[in-house]
Image (tube, rainbow, N blue to C red):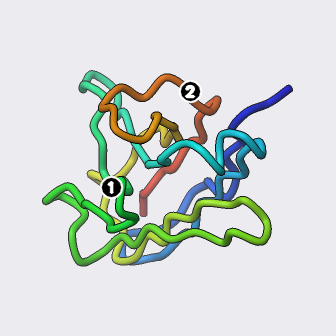
Amino acid sequence: QVQLAESGGGSVQPGGSLRLSCTAARDLYSYFCLGWFRQAPGKEREGIATLNDNGSPSYADSVQGRFTISKDNAIRTLYLQMNSLQSEDTAMYYCAARRYGTQDYNYWGQGIQVTVSS
């Protein structure tokens, strides 16, 4: 059973927008905190938009003000709205889940490519 499944990636020009979706299995969505990570070629994976235990969002400085994380509980889906995309945002994007009260993300989606290029 697929636990986390990302969708919505693709290619976009600089300044454009994309919205990523992550559909989670029922148990993961209900009992785990979800977040978005990315990994660019030659760079370490970084957390860019995550949900704290109280549901509040945290953003990396690199995406603050441009990206928004949100959820639709009715369909167990996590979103990442990405605006004002830049070439530096080109990366593989991952949805991940961690247990409440912990810091380790133990469940990962397969990842989806986002390419920002003119």
Question: Mark 2–mark 1 contact, CB under 8 Å?
Answer: no
Residue 73 quadrant: bottom right
Q: Earlier in the sequence, mark 2 or mark 1?
A: 1
Decide which of 115, 76 is in the foreground and name it: 76
The tag on residue 52 is 1
Q: Amino acid at mark 1?
A: Asn
Residue 39 quadrant: top left
Position above or below: 105 against 118: above
Residue 58 rendering spot, x and y as whole percentages: 26, 60
- Position of 29 with respect to 56 (left or right) is right
As helix, strand or loop, the secondary structure at mark 1 comes to loop
Sort mark 1 into few (<14), some (14-19) or many (20+) by Cα contacts within 10 Å.
some
- Position of 80 with respect to 109 (left or right) is left
Outermost left residue:
61
Residue 2 rendering spot, x and y as whole percentages: 80, 30
Residue 60 rendering spot, x and y as whole percentages: 20, 55
According to the picture, the residue beneath numbered tag 2 turns out to be 107
Q: Amino acid at mark 2?
A: Tyr
Determine the residue positioned at 36% across, 53% down. Answer: 53
Q: Nearer the viewer, mark 2 or mark 1?
A: 1
Figure quadrant of the C terminus: bottom left
Determine the residue positioned at 51% across, 50% down. Answer: 114
As helix, strand or loop, the secondary structure at mark 2 comes to strand
Residue 23 rendering spot, x and y as whole percentages: 72, 51
The tag on residue 117 is none
Instruction: State how far apart marks 2 and 1 are (Cα).
Output: 16 Å
